[in-house]
Image (tube, rainbow, N blue to C red):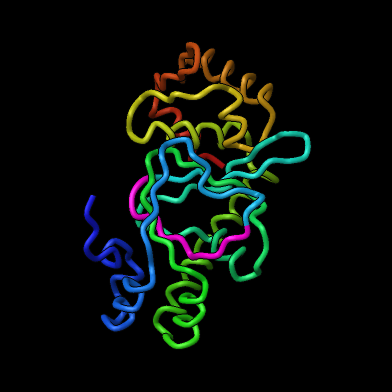
Amino acid sequence: MTITDWTQRFHGTSHLPEAVRARLRAAARIVKFPKGAEVFGPDNVPDSLMFLYEGRIRVSQSSDTGREIVLYRVEAGESCVLTTACMLAEEAYNAEGIAETDVTAIVLPKPAFDRLAAEEDAFRDFVFQAYSRRLIDLLRVVDDVAFGRIDVRLAERLLALADGANEVQATHQQLASELGTAREVVSRVLHDFQKRELVSQSRGKITLTDTTALQALAHST
């Protein structure tokens, strides 16, 4: 893949003044990760701001007991708020980012980030607007885990993972990690869904047999 002007790929950077975009292109570099690779982890202190050019990264956090929760996904055209936060604080990640597909990313080294943030109002506004939007997303995750009904959340996640299709390739444990709950809880709810003929199950695969009912459940309160 030949990348000529990566700043066009991102809504925020594409609207920056050309002089700022030129500085970004001069300072940034391109990195690639294969599917399944760790993009960042708890042992790393980030030294760059990351823009995801192609692919998808799953960001998750694990407890001392091994339970995992998916915090969010970084999609192509987005920046990673956790990278931004840890870089600004000069602290190690408290979560892990795994490439769910082959990934191409643009990384802006911290010295260049610091100069641009100090000297270019448009760039600074872009970074912190993106940061604020993702922080709101994380607060929704906290609210869902603390107060959301598990059947509603599971219906929502199945539909999201299916992405317009009628099949999800995932184990009960993987779905539990998506929702920040126990595998047994997911198994119990899926068994109920199956009895209601909303889904059917086979090893490592869930077929959505009644997407209309699942959508109704996902939008219920």
Residue 75 x/y as whole percent: 40, 50
Residue 105 x/y as whole percent: 39, 55
From this view, report whether residue 148 is shown above or below residue 125. above
Q: Residue at x 50, y 86 (%)?
A: 118
Q: Residue at x 38, y 67 (%)?
A: 28
Count of numbered circles in the view: 0
In the image, taking residue 41 as reference, residue 32 lies left or right, namely left
Hey, which residue is sitting farthest bottom in the picture?
119
Name the dominant secondary structure of the magenta segment.
Answer: strand
| Along the viewing direction, whichever of 83 and 167 lies nearer the viewer | 83
| Along the viewing direction, whichever of 204 and 200 lies nearer the viewer | 204
In the image, taking residue 104 as reference, residue 198 lies left or right, namely right
Residue 169 x/y as whole percent: 44, 23
Residue 218 x/y as whole percent: 49, 37
Q: Residue at x 66, y 24 (%)?
A: 183
Find the magenta span and give its range: 45-55
Q: Which quadrant holds residue 47?
A: bottom right
From this view, report whether residue 207 is shown above or below residue 132. above
- Is 211 magenta? The answer is no
| Along the viewing direction, whichever of 187 and 14 lies nearer the viewer | 14
Q: Residue at x 66, y 50 (%)?
A: 43
In the image, taking residue 169 as reference, residue 146 lies left or right, namely right
In the image, taking residue 50 as reference, residue 77 lies left or right, namely left
- Is 47 magenta? The answer is yes
Q: Which quadrant holds residue 167?
A: top left
Screen quadrant of the C terminus: top right
